[in-house]
Image (cartoon, rainbow, N blue to C red):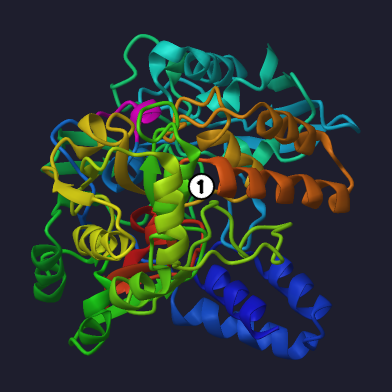
């Protein structure tokens, strides 16, 4: 009960839960009405949002090649940027429920094959034009175009028909999907005027802040959108993001007060940073995970015996201890953990086994030439050290693995999803369907392992429309086994999200969906 109550208190403190909702939920938990009323009054007085000032963040994961096109967002800085100027039909809260944003009502057919969304009235884009159902249809249509290279392609391809009628949006699906609202919370799907067809890089959306200056890889600044519909969001007058990819420089900027928040605190210095005056380390376990990505359609990784050898050659526990300093857990070569609904905890944990790895390597018939894994410090915190550990553990199995250090700038455009073996990360998604649809469906644009398995695709489509949770869990379990044993994905570890925040930042609450409060810390927090 404590965790749920703490979460409600933080939401109430941030102005994101009304007194009526707080009273209803706490009394349902067994808290007396008198105590619940006193708790709400205390948090309401203690930390009321303050408007004004400039919120500055130091961000890892920004490059000179970044764009304001939300379809292309693939690393932290573009993700945070899109969540600052953009607004989606719906979002996902820290407790895993749907947060109505541009939509203010949702309904579906009994089989979850047709969904209707009512568009909130009075929502305007930064150019003053109203947000309409037609804009939503156009936005989703643009993301269905493979030329848009959208990270949400696998999601919107499941929509067979879109219809706008007044303030109503109706989406008919190719196959039923009980999780559709969660999929539409994807950060790529920021609603743009006319769908963004005229200029997807304009940075014009319906979010709480307008883009003022965009210098990719260096600095992005924003001013409050005074016409924003939600008064509980957007407290600072201005927001500024400084791209600081170097961990030491980013941490120093936080300690000196140059910035108010940073993402991706190096786990190995987290304890030292906790002791620094004026600074807090915010940590939350979630669905984030680090990955080693092999292209299943490219030699030598088109050989499943070699892929299995490389999976068994990872010392996962060593990486959790040395790279994450214990702030995470071992991965199991599929992207789902206990943070997901319907997770199958009976799937055996894959362990480091150099003898078995050596046997699979011999069985693969590999010619002994160097196997190159590409890495960069922006891939994830500690990625270069993780690559070196991997090289050592693989060579103990007789596998000639070599790590190649790539430049940080351009890594997400020139290496990830391009080179056949590289390091990456995923922040995870709220539900299994969205994670699998985004990255492992054979037709997904972000299928970064080039995984193509007919049984997996068929099970994914069936699971979407399966309303019996026992049957659906069994389908997800089978998919996990297929991906774990046949895919090109190595998941060495699930990472906690670790952010650094100065004491003057108020309104922070933990959110397991992603770093920096699901990329929206700057727009939800205030300075006090």
Res. 508 visible in picture: yes
Which type of secondary structure does the marked residue at label 1 adopt? Answer: loop
Residue 528 in view, yes or no: no
Q: Residues within 10 Å of mark 1 (few under 14, many from 20)?
A: few
Would you name the residue on which mark 1 appears?
Answer: 230
- Image point 79% across, 80% down: which residue? 29
Q: Quadrant of residue 320?
A: bottom left
Q: Find out whether residue 58 is within the magenta segment.
A: no
Say which of 382 and 160 sits in front: 382
Q: Which residue shows up at 25% across the image and 29% down it?
A: 67
Furthest residue in direction top, as rendered: 198
Give the left or right position of residue 517, taking residue 236 as reference. right
Query: 358 or 34, which is in the foreground?
Result: 358
The region drawn magenta spans 67-73
Quarter of the N terminus within the rendering: bottom right
Give the image location of residue 6, x and y in percent.
59, 80
Q: Position of residue 343 (x, y in %)?
A: 69, 59
- On the rendered image, what quadrant is the C terminus found in? bottom left
Q: Where's residue 50, x and y in %?
A: 36, 66
Instruction: Please say if 491 is above or below 478.
Output: below
Front residue (pair 120, 306): 306
Q: Quadrant of residue 415?
A: top left
68 in magenta? yes
Task: Using the image as rendered, state which of residue 261 and residue 420 is in the foreground.
Answer: 420
Percent across and percent down for residue 399 are 30, 53
Horizontally, is 135 left or right of 410 in the view?
Answer: right
């Amino acid at each position: 009960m404590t965790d749920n109550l703490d979460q409600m208190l933080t939401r109430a403190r941030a102005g994101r839960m009304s007194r009526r909702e707080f009273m209803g939920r706490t009394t349902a938990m067994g808290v007396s009405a008198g105590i619940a009323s006193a708790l709400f009054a205390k948090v309401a007085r203690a930390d009321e949002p303050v408007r004004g000032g400039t919120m500055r963040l130091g961000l890892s994961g920004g490059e000179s090649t970044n764009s304001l096109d939300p379809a292309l967002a693939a690393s932290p800085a573009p993700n945070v940027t899109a969540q600052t100027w953009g607004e989606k039909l719906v979002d996902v809260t820290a407790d895993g429920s749907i947060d109505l944003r541009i939509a203010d009502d949702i309904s579906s057919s009994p089989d979850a094959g047709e969904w209707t969304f009512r568009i909130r009235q009075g929502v305007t884009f930064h150019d003053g034009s109203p947000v309409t159902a037609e804009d939503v249809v156009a936005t989703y249509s643009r993301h269905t175009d493979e030329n848009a290279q959208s990270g949400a392609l696998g999601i919107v391809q499941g929509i067979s028909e879109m219809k706008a009628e007044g303030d109503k949006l109706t989406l008919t699906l190719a196959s039923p999907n009980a999780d559709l609202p969660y999929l539409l919370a994807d950060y790529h799907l920021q609603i743009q005027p006319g769908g963004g067809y005229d200029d997807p890089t304009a940075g014009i959306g319906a979010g709480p802040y307008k883009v003022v200056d965009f210098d990719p890889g260096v600095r992005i600044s924003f001013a409050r959108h005074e016409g924003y519909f939600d008064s509980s969001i957007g407290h600072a007058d201005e927001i500024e993001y400084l791209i600081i990819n170097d961990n030491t420089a980013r941490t120093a900027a936080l300690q000196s007060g140059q910035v108010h928040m940073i993402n991706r605190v190096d786990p190995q210095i987290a304890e030292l940073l906790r002791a620094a005056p004026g600074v807090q380390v915010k940590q939350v376990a979630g669905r984030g995970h680090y990955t080693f990505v092999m292209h299943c359609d490219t030699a030598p990784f088109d050989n499943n015996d070699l892929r299995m050898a490389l999976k068994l050659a990872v010392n996962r526990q060593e990486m959790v201890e040395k790279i994450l300093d214990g702030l995470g857990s071992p991965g199991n070569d599929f992207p789902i953990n206990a943070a997901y609904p319907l997770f199958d905890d009976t799937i055996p944990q894959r362990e480091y086994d150099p003898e078995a790895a050596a046997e699979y390597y011999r069985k693969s018939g590999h010619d002994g030439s160097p196997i190159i894994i590409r890495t960069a410090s922006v891939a994830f915190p500690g990625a270069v050290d993780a690559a070196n550990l991997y090289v050592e553990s693989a060579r103990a199995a007789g596998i000639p693995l070599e790590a190649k250090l790539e430049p940080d700038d351009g890594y997400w455009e020139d290496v990830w999803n391009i080179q056949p073996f590289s390091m990456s990360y995923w922040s995870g998604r709220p539900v299994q369907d969205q994670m699998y649809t985004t990255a492992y469906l054979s037709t997904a644009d972000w299928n970064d392992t080039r995984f193509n398995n007919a049984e997996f695709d068929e099970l994914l489509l069936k699971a979407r429309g399966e309303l019996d949770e026992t049957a659906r869990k069994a389908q997800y379990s089978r998919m996990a086994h297929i991906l774990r044993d046949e895919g090109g994905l190595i998941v060495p570890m699930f990472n906690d999200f670790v952010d650094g925040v100065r004491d003057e930042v108020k309104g922070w609450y933990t959110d397991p969906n992603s770093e920096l409060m699901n990329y929206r810390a700057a727009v939800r927090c205030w300075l006090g």
